[in-house]
Image (cartoon, rainbow, N blue to C red):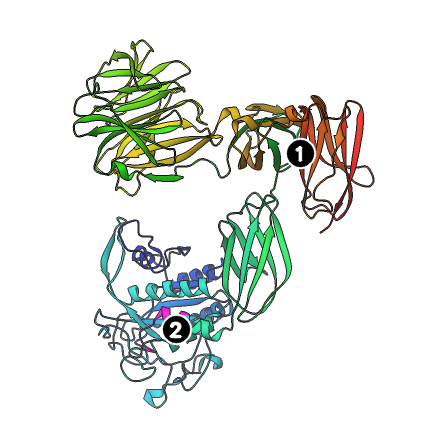
Amino acid sequence: HGTRCAGVIVGDGTGGDTTGVAPGATLMVLRNWAYGWSSEATHFLAVQYAVANGAQVISCSMSYDRIEDANPPVIPDYVTHRIIQEASLAAGVIQANSTGNNGDDIGVPWNVNAPANCPPPFLHPDQAPTGGLSAILACGFYRETGIIDNNSDVGPSEWYDPGYPPQFRDYPWQGGTSMGLLKPDVVGPSRVKTTTLGGAYYLYFSGSSASAPNLAGGLALLRSMHQQASPERIAEAIKMTAEDAGDPGHDNVYGAGRYRVDLAHAYLDSIMGYGGLFVTAGDAFGDPVDSLEILLDDGEVRGLLREGSLSLPRVLPGLYTLTATGEGWQPQSVPFVQVSPGDTTRIALMMDRVHFGIDPPALEFAILTGDTARAAVTLENDQPGTRNYTLSARPRGGVDWEVDTTLTMDRLAGVDIETLAAFDSLLLVAGVTSGEATLWRFTPGGEFIDSVSLPVMGGEYGLTGLDAGGDSLLYGVTLTTLYTFDHDLNVIDSLALPTSLAWSLAYDDRTEQFFVGDYIGSVFRLSAGGDLLETYDFGAPVAGLAFHAEDRRGAMLFALTPGDPGQASLMRRNMGTGVIQGEADLAPDGADSAAGLDLEALTDAPFWDLRSLHHSGAVRRFRRELRRDAYDLPADFQVPPGGAAVEVAFHGPAMNIGRHPLELVWENRTDGWTYLMPVVVTVEPGNRAAETAAALPEAPDLLPPYPNPFNSAVTIRFRLAKRAAVRLEIVDLLGRRVALLADAPFTAGEHGVRWEAGGRASGMYFAVLRTGGLRRAAKLLLLK
């Protein structure tokens, strides 16, 4: 029963094609009843626990009947229910409760069970007399036709027992001489979809046990959109916008009517007088920040900032303090945020990273194509023992299997294509057209250049696998033979294969070895002379292969298998451990099966690209690791007590001209934490060291910092006539070191190092450069 109620509210759709009403809500499960141990007291405890632990909406599909002809009579503890529900309302909670399934069997005024007979948070204008309020919205149920079900409880209820406290004798009925308390409050649908105990979704969960959680899901939606709307205002919106049914107005069969959450949402928009708030957040480099929790005051309004922005369109007018927090970021508070009715206030945040004693917390370089950017990073260690670190570099945001680019090759529509490879700065696709083996050549961006017939590659499939052997050789396989082509696509060598069903090819230029996959699922590792060295079993036809020597987890052999029609399943074999396992689905939409695979060290960016070819003719590009020739880092190192400095370097010759957002992953294996350091390398044309060698000063030169004065960050540039050890630090007016920016050798030429002032106070600072026994200083003015 509880599982089905939960599915109505928060079912997330994984068991079928239907979700609950509020699939994004957080569910607190409280066991309220079981044979042999529960009573009304457990219900009271459950409500109190929910309120104490921050619940905003309670859904209860349990209620307590009045059975006067039992021996002894069963009379619910109405007074305690009322006390609990009034306290719940005072705490800001609203509760959707089933009325029971008695119809009119018990008789007025006791048909509606406790606690559903407690007053609602808002009294409908038709309610007279008026009295106290509580958290309860009592929900009856109607059939698929919209007509009330015969088993939906009928009101009114009465609060007028002489034994009640005086404040609870506020809704007399007195045998029908007075109105009593109009009940139910609203009615909702029965026979709704929900979860089964097996996890699937099914139809026909019925009764007020089904309609109450359906209402609770709607209340959760309203509370998430209208965070400052009180339970009283939400109940008002629900009751005043319900579709009238039965007798006009609020009756005792349909209540206020069939509730409509969409109309209640619009009603609240019309009465609350909202203003709006739009928050953006970036880091020191201007890149958007993700996953920040934004709070107004003590959480009166909250939201999750994603990909740099958050819109809060419903905020009551007033003056707030905004707080931004997120894992890995310094908390930030903005006081005196004014929100005005009908207007949107905009707030821009600049977030600083928590850097775990790593200084500087971020790096930014501006270099020429022929230069190398170097920096010393200081790691604190105030512990008595040595700390063990691992350091790696990667693209900003990490490496995943989200498609970076999709190329659609219209020229290949309807062609039987088999494989692809990057060669001679072009993209080659092999297949068969009109019974003839053919190579189509495209630009890296997918523009068609020409096609080349390969008559020597006869047969039904032509070339089934391709891979480049450096800049001058191309390798290809047919079902039975491995061919070597020169730059002009002339065959210069061939080898017989240990299979007659070869379907893919990869080449390891470090060892000059081949990997040949076949239709059975085997992959053969061959020497340069064709000798069989090893066989691997991938368990499925291998349509594509790619060997990646610089994968972050060690050398990997990737295999693309079509599996069932419409799939492109990527598997990997770790060449160090020999373990074969699944990696990703490169066609998650299921519409495009695998044809080939290729991996290339890009020449226009410092990354590896993996490309998958699909039978539709589409080529999907996946950005992978940072190329190893683009940086120098100590992969594993130790930091002794007291701390140490580590030099990192990024090489301009390995990067194309432009701005490259990267990150360094500092993993403290001793203490179990990881810090992601933002790095930006901007590469400009030229080689400053070669171009300016004659003009370089004999002594080191500290150039004017820019910008200066500055608000949060400043770049400090200096020139060296020759390679030298450099120590660059920031000191305050008393000569105390504020930050160590560099402590490492630098090459001849001009260099720039960025200082992130972070939480430093406004005022005068000095950049101090020391090298070769000489000292240079420059003033810095920080203004906030």
Looking at the picture, does residue 484 appear above or below residue 742? above
Instruction: Indicate left or right for 735 with 3 as reference.
Output: right
Circle 2/circle 1 CB separation < 8 Å: no
Q: Dividing the picture into quarters, in which one does residue 28 lie?
A: bottom left
Q: Tell which of 130 and 529 is nearer to you.
A: 529
Amino acid type, label 2: Ile
Q: Where in the figure is residue 488, as x and y percent of width and height?
A: 33, 19
The reply to whether residue 72 is in sight is: no
Looking at the picture, does residue 510 appear above or below residue 558? above
Q: Where in the figure is residue 317, as x and y percent of width and height?
A: 57, 70
Q: Tell which of 58 and 35 is nearer to you.
A: 58
The reply to whether residue 339 is in sight is: yes
> For numbered disc 1, what is the local secondary structure?
strand
Q: Which mark is residue 238?
A: 2
Which residue is painted at 71% across and 29% down in the image? 719
Q: Which mark is residue 552?
A: none
CA gap, disc 2 and disc 1: 62 Å
Residue mark closest to the camera, 2 vs 1: 1
The residue range painted magenta reads 255-265
Looking at the picture, does residue 749 appear above or below residue 456? below
Amino acid type, label 1: Gly
Q: Earlier in the sequence, mark 2 or mark 1?
A: 2
Q: Dividing the picture into quarters, in which one does residue 221 lie?
A: bottom left
Categorize mark 2 by other alpha carbons within 10 Å: few (<14), some (14-19), many (20+): many
Q: Which mark is residue 752?
A: 1
Q: Where in the figure is residue 507, as x and y percent of width and height?
A: 35, 19
Q: Tell which of 621 and 458 is nearer to you.
A: 458
Is residue 259 part of the magenta span, yes or no?
Answer: yes
Is residue 303 part of the magenta span, yes or no?
Answer: no
